[in-house]
Amino acid sequence: AQTVTQSQPEMSVQEAETVTLSCTYDTSENNYYLFWYKQPPSRQMILVIRQEAYKQQNATENRFSVNFQKAAKSFSLKISDSQLGDTAMYFCAFMKHGGTGTSYGKLTFGQGTILTVHP
Amino acid sequence: NAGVTQTPKFRVLKTGQSMTLLCAQDMNHEYMYWYRQDPGMGLRLIHYSVGEGTTAKGEVPDGYNVSRLKKQNFLLGLESAAPSQTSVYFCASSYHMTSGSIDTQYFGPGTRLTVL
């Protein structure tokens, strides 16, 4: 079974600065996906960024980028130029890549990191 | 295009009562999921469905039942609610790509359920 660990329950950052959220995972799979989801106070789960394990290049989405270290099983999220709207709970999640049947796309989530952006 | 919607948004039950949570998606996704979110534990999978008429157990299925009579709807039922089922419930859906991999999951807004 896969496990996902987010060791930082809470983080804070000043507006316009950069912050990095940590995530480690444990799996015996070779092909998988990793995700970062954002959950603002509205409770809506919003996909921030996605990484395919077979891709060596780190994914980027505007101000959001990841540092994917497959051998170390580490998947950190860097938020540049932090904005007040980035205040949210952030979840790291793992999904096995697979064919059909039992490969139903189960997401395994970490415990979450609460990020507060201060003005 | 409404995406994934959930009904109701809030509900308070007494122990032993029953209720059904409705999830609907208009993206023609094959896969649908029900998760619960508890403080400090992230989201955990309750049940899932890989297509109309099929359901299967996830990580924490006890005390819940599900049905997928139509492709666009996935119902989560609590037959006899217990205080331990107080949680926020999320529905999600995803597209099953022909390559065999599965696309990103899209989430509904959640239902906050309190069982007294």
Image (cartoon, helix red, strand yellow):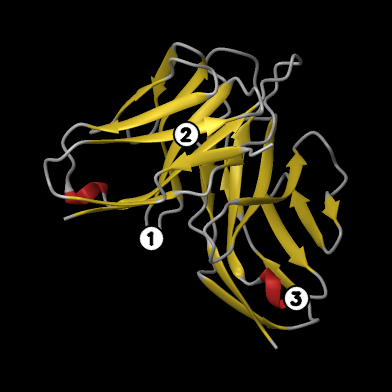
Relative to A9, does residue A64 appear above or below in the rendering? above
Quarter the C terminus of chain B occupies: bottom left
Q: Is residue B101 left or right of residue B63?
A: right
Q: Which of the two discs, 1 and 2, sits closer to the camera?
A: 2
Q: How far apart are the alpha carbons under marks 1 and 2?
A: 22 Å
Residue drawn at (58%, 64%) of the image: A40
Helix, strand or loop at mark 3: loop
Mark 3: amino acid: Gln
Residue, far bottom: A119
Q: Residue at x 53, y 48 (%)?
A: A4
Pointer 1 chain: B
| In the rendered image, the vertical position of residue B39 relative to residue B70, given as above or below | below
Q: Quadrant of residue B40?
A: bottom left
Q: Which residue is mark 1?
A: B39
Q: Nearer the viewer, residue A56 or B27?
A: B27
| Labels 1, 2: one chain | yes
> The residue under label 2 is which amino acid type?
Cys
Total of numbered circles in the picture? 3
Can see residue B67? yes
Q: Residues within 10 Å of mark 3 (few under 14, many from 20)?
A: some
Task: Mark yes or no: residue A73 visible.
Answer: no
Chain that bears disc 3: A
Percent x, y of residue B1: 69, 36
Q: Residue at x 76, y 50 (%)?
A: A68
Tag shown at residue A83? 3
Disc number placed over residue B23 in the picture, else none: 2
